[in-house]
Amino acid sequence: MSDANPKSQPFSNAEKDPDDWTTGDEPMTGAQASYLKTLSEEAGEAFDESLSKADASKRIDALQEKTGRGN
């Protein structure tokens, strides 16, 4: 019996690179904006309300790493 659990794999079809999203150039969602604003405040960095969905996702990832959230 294998110890490999497919659910333990870090990547799935649902986790595409934001650059590959078909809607990535649309404005960020309200949820992204709210979370990004919170992360920006915690990190002491400016919040850019003009980011696209894809750019907001990448910024969230970067700020999560900086603040230790999402780990």
Image (cartoon, helix red, strand yellow):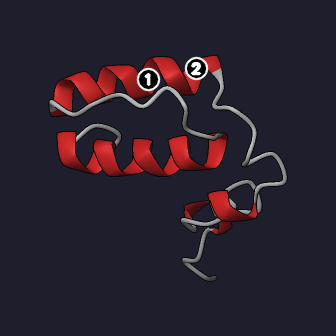
According to the picture, the residue beneath numbered tag 1 turns out to be: 35
Q: Between residues 52 and 71, which one lies in front from this camera angle? A: 52
Three-letter code for the amino acid on which mark 1 is drawn:
Tyr
Q: Which residue is drawn at 48% across and 52% down?
A: 58
Image quarter hosting the N terminus? bottom right
Considering every residue shown, the one lying at the far right of the view is 22
Three-letter code for the amino acid on which mark 2 is drawn:
Ala
According to the picture, the residue beneath numbered tag 2 turns out to be: 31
In contact (CB < 8 Å): disc 1 and disc 2: yes
For disc 1, the neighbor class at 10 Å (few under 14, some 14 to 19, many from 20) is few
Question: Percent x, y for residue 65?
Answer: 27, 50
Q: In this view, does 39 lie to the left or right of 57?
A: left
Residue 44's quadrant in the figure?
top left
**What whole-number distance in Å separates the C-alpha atoms at marks 1 and 2?**
6 Å
Q: Which residue is drawn at 61% across and 68% down?
A: 5
Q: Is residue 62 left or right of residue 48?
A: left
Question: Percent x, y for residue 27?
Answer: 69, 32
